[in-house]
Image: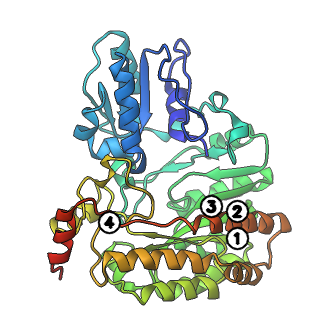
Amino acid sequence: FPPMALMAIAALTPENYDVMITDEEIEPIDFNLDVDLVGISLLMMTAARGYEIADKFRARGVKVVLGGMHATVLPEEAADHADAVVIGEAECVWHKVLADTTGGKLRQFYRSDTYCDMKDIPRPRRDLISSNKYFSTNLIQATRGCPNRCSFCSIHSVSGNNLRSRPIPKVVSEIKTFSNPGVIFIDDNIVGDPDYAKELFKALIPLRIWWFGQATLEIAADEELLNLAAQSGCKVLFFGFESLSKKNIIKIGKAKTNNVQNYKKAIKNLHSNGICVAGSFILGLDDDDPSSFTSIVDFIRKNHIEMPSVNPLIPLPGTQLYKRMKREGRLIRDNYWSDNSYKPGSIIFQPKHMTSEELRKGYENTRRQIYSGSSIAKRLWGSRHNKPFVLLLSVIVHNLKTRKTTQVKSVPYVHNDFAKKKLENSNIE
């Protein structure tokens, strides 16, 4: 998908500025560009590379401003690689950054002390990206914020715990500009406000679109909400199941939305409404042991989850989980994101009831099993009802492509003998 944050910031920039977007996922960066200001949006996984890019431009004397999730939770770190750091949502401060850049008075930090009013945000600048290089450019946001406080999540650090929503007519109007009927809602929880979601879904029905989004499992328990989502064109929803352990769900702060006993019923309700389930599970939570891997594999197969994903727990900076892991001495390295050696699937902490090596092997084996040929066939055959052929075909392609990546091995994040000895000698209760 294209970089939505950069398209949104470009839309905030007045017309008298020349703006271009470079996405290194699809094209190389021209470090010799004649520009006055470079803006880089950082996630934890892109922070190290973002700092490298910033340092190269600054070496030429080009001003650099860093923002995004990672810069918001670690502004002092980001400031070592930038002339300015945006903390929080850009909508409230970007005009100040531009004015100070033009006036030669760029400040080190620009903190958004409030959250933007979703009523007035402009449409992202899709004209600045090459649409033919992405799976889809029809990304749209109807709401921001999340009322939940999951300990492993940093969303509320930037977007807050109060859900804010755009006027539904503006959402509908933007969708009508899309060149095809496939739409991706990037909202962290499209049903965070059920009343708003119901009105939104009603407004989408006449558009005859297909849409994909993220939600909590609460939607499956609200028959009216679920039926309206299906009628409005919902075809795939991403859910964070996270764990099959009630103890884990309680400890990570997700008991409000995740009732483990109701998982099977929730999936059945979604399938009966023709909605594919993209289900995510976290490996290595505190109640997990080596037997947890088999339980997750069996659950995914028996409940025909069309698009499953499993990942080792990641203690993201800025989260309560990270602070706790650091306090307990369980991080193999505090600032594991600071160089390019970190890769998705790396084990960067010491689990409670298994070794880091057991977690690594369990992760690899779990991925191989859920994306084996027989598993794909059984899962998709069992969920084929009430779904159009084109949707099933696209899900099959997704599964086959994901299967290829299961051959990529993960690595324990241990760089030196000191770290190894620390793990060997640690007695974690």
Q: Residue at (42%, 45%) from the top-left corner? A: 46
Q: Which residue is mark 3?
A: 198
Residue type (three-letter) at the residue carrying disc 3: Lys
Q: Where is residue 34 shown, x and y percent of the image?
A: 49, 13
Is residue 360 in sight in this rendering?
Answer: yes
* Disc ID at residue 151: 4
Q: Which residue is mark 1?
A: 275
Q: Where is residue 43 shown, x and y percent of the image?
A: 41, 47
Mark in front: 3 vs 1 = 1
Q: Residue at (72%, 84%) from the top-left corner? A: 378
Q: Earlier in the sequence, mark 2 or mark 3?
A: 3
Labels 2 & 1 near each other (Cβ < 8 A): yes
Q: Would you call the spot at circle 1 few (<14 residues within 10 Å), some (14-19), or many (20 or more)? A: many
Q: Mark 3 to mark 1: distance in Å?
A: 16 Å
Q: Which residue is mark 2?
A: 234
Residue type (three-letter) at the residue carrying disc 1: Ile
Q: Where is residue 351 shown, x and y percent of the image?
A: 29, 76
Mark in front: 2 vs 3 = 2
